[in-house]
Image (tube, helix red, strand yellow):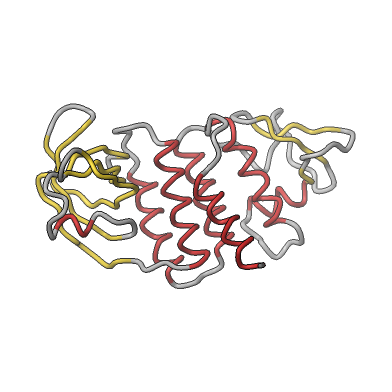
Amino acid sequence: MHQPAFVLHSRPYKESSALVELFTPQGRLRAVMRAARGRAGSLLRPFVSLEIELRGRGDLKTVARLEQAGPTFWLDGQALFSGLYLNELLVRLLPVEDAQPALFEHYAATLPALAAKRPIEPLLRAFEWRLLGELGYGFALEHDLQGLPIEPAGLYRLIPDAGLEPVSQFQPGLFNGAELLAMAEADWQVPGALAAAKRLMRQALAPHLGGRPLVSRELFMNMKEVSRD
């Protein structure tokens, strides 16, 4: 069956093949591409719209056909590291062969937005939120754990995979209600809302990353340090 795909990651495999992590509407798929040093092998890079045909019944498929089916999204600077971050999240969090058509469409729409130099932080927060929801880890931003409306002046902490719990005293890592309500509306004009969304997504994703740091995040931080020197 032919289907659209993007390469999330690839690495050499045996003598002339490549082991490829693909993102398709059918989810994350693992495949071997033989003779990967040929013309088709040049397409095994991120952010290229592909059409593929896979064969095999096990978890590890074989690439029977691979062609470019759309544009290559050329990312550089922060946009490049952001794209690599999205790819790493998908490799780390998506189960193999768990169909994700809606998430695939969201990813396919995010790449051209990154390439067009749109503001990066809202794009990343929207994708993280969609990823959590599609994986069943989402939670409400307008209501707390008891189903009560979020109060703009209230303080809340995140209980991962459950929701927001009101607290009466300040402690590190909390979120105020006004920030949460702004996130629910994607209203990034509210002071502090975008920074709070970044903290919230990190807290929500952390339990599912198994304590292992994200390579893309470390690369980005190193790039920022080098640019300061």
- Residue shown at the point (33%, 56%) measured from the top left: 46
Seen at 44% across and 72% down, the residue is: 116
Q: Quadrant of residue 221?
A: bottom right
Residue 187, image x and y in percent? 66, 60
Pinpoint residue 9: horizontal percent, then vertical percent.
33, 47
Examine the rendered structure and indicate whether residue 1 appears above or below residue 37: above
Point out residue 177 in the picture as x, y percentages from the top left corner: 77, 46
- What residue appears at the point 14 percent right and 48 percent down from the top-left corner? 2
Furthest residue toward right = 169
**Depth order, front residue of 156/145:** 156
For the N terminus, the image quarter is top left
Closer to the camera, 209 or 123? 209
Q: Is residue 165 left or right of residue 213?
A: right
Q: Looking at the figure, which quarter contains the C terminus?
A: bottom right
Rendered view: 73 above or below 97: below
Residue 145: x and y, percent? 69, 29
Q: Residue at x 22, y 40 (%)?
A: 13
Judge left or right: residue 168 versus residue 120: right
Q: How many marks?
A: 0
Q: Nearer the viewer, residue 42 or 96?
A: 42
